[in-house]
Amino acid sequence: MLTVDRLNVYIEASHILRDVSLAVGERELVCLIGRNGAGKTTTLRAIMGYQPPHTGAIAFGGRSLVGASVFEVARMGLGFSPEDSGVFGELTVAENIAMPTWTRATARPAAERIATAYTVFPGLRRYDARRGAQLSGGERKMLSIARALALDPEMLLLDEPFEGLSPAIIPAISEGIHAITRMGRSILLAESNIHHVPEFADRLYVIERGEIIFAGPPAEVHAQADVLKIIGGAP
């Protein structure tokens, strides 16, 4: 479904991504793990069209994303929840969730897409009329993911969905993500804490200093002592 092949990205004179390759198949949850500054966000932003690659290929559903605008990438069926949530503070919860239905038409009616978003995080219903700026950090994360789902995408890119959240809210976010996978949507999830990787993840990639240093099933990373030291999974 999504393939990234030998991607190189520069930001000004800095070489941020170095030959990054990864893949996400249909109905898969794939996690990109790395420390802060390792290149996770740049990878997701390059896929979404925010950051143009220097070299390399990005394809989604057999179509190249290189050179496509963010709007075009979203229209192709990629939903994005950024690290800072990207919630519109002056809009209500209901307006934030409805917005993607205005910008991308699909076979599913807008009302059905909005209802699906609330199914994943039903607690948002009681904040329908509350503005985005009035939400807590955890509520903004939920709203950001719900809004991305209302786009009716085939795949979601989730950047640090657990970052900065209290332990009490993390299970709700994880269950929401699990619900999305049960709907058959693919997910590429970037995360800095190996302990936050959902147990239902299909595959992991570990990125360090812009390079992929591990790719494989989650169980296999625990046999890589050097990799675990980098991502904080070892004592």
Image: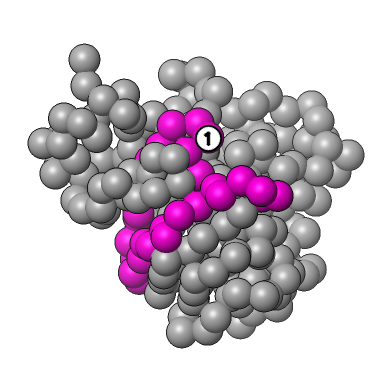
* Badge 1: residue crowd in 10 Å (few <14, some 14–19, many ≥20): some
Q: What residue type is labelled 1?
A: Gly
Q: Give the range drawn in magenta.
A: 11-40
- Tell me: 123 left or right of 105: left
Please state the horizontal and vertical placement of residue 174, each as a whole percent of the image. 41, 38
Residue displayed at 42% across by 58% down: 20
Q: Can residue 112 be seen in this view?
A: no
Magenta residue check for 116 = no
Please state the horizontal and vertical placement of residue 109, each as a whole percent of the image. 66, 74
Query: The N terminus appears in which quarter of the rendering?
Result: bottom left
Where disc 1 sits, the SS reads loop
Please state the horizontal and vertical placement of residue 111, each as a whole percent of the image. 68, 65
Residue denoted by label 1 = 37
Magenta residue check for 22 = yes
Residue displayed at 37% across by 62% down: 22
Q: Which residue lies furthest to the front in this view?
A: 13
- The residue nearer to you, when weighing 210 against 131, is 210
